[in-house]
Amino acid sequence: MAKVIIAQTKEQRDDAFYIRKKVFVEEQNVPLHIELDEFDLESTHFVLYEEGEPIGAGRIRLIDETTGKIERISILPQYRGRNFGKLIMEEVEKEARAHRLHKLKLNAQVHAIPFYEKLGYVVTSPEFLDADIVHRAMEKNLID
């Protein structure tokens, strides 16, 4: 059974970094020095485990007192299309609400925009490049 946890130990954070390296560095050719950045220290990291194995990851960090930025949502290729990304996002949003955040922002790779739209995110920018990959900014209000 799949379970998302907030990384509390070095081993759990290493599991998150392992997933990110597999997806972003190896699969999408993002340079390691860009993928692992200065925001890793201040972010809350999430790891998705299936039968004890790490298969997905993501992080959130505060932009200001009421806004969080979701980053690095990633699922290993062989596990995609099975709603695991949604599981991670639900846990990230649950944590954001627990911290009384009003808004969540993210930069979505364009192929992932429909996934985020199904979760209530709306596009807020034209296309731009990040690590040579086309993205668009998106956001979601957590309070009405």
Image: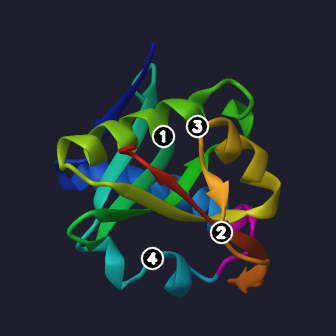
**Which stretch did the figure color magenta?**
25-30
Q: Secondary structure at mark 3?
A: helix
Instruction: Answer with mark 3 or mark 4, whichever residue precedes in sequence.
Output: 4
- Residue 141 picture location, percent across and down: 45, 51
Instruction: Answer with mark 2 or mark 4, whichever residue precedes in sequence.
Output: 4
CA gap, disc 4 to disc 1? 20 Å
Q: Which kind of residue does numbered mark 3 sit on?
A: Gly
Q: Which kind of residue does numbered mark 4 sit on?
A: Leu
CA gap, disc 1 to disc 3? 6 Å
Instruction: Answer with mark 2 or mark 1, whichever residue precedes in sequence.
Output: 1
CA gap, disc 2 to disc 1? 19 Å
Q: Looking at the rendering, in which quadrant would you find the C terminus?
A: top left
Residue occupying image coordinates x 71% and y 34%: 80
Q: Looking at the rendering, in which quadrant would you find the N terminus?
A: top left
Which mark is nearer the camera, 4 or 1?
Answer: 1
* Residue annotated with mark 3: 85
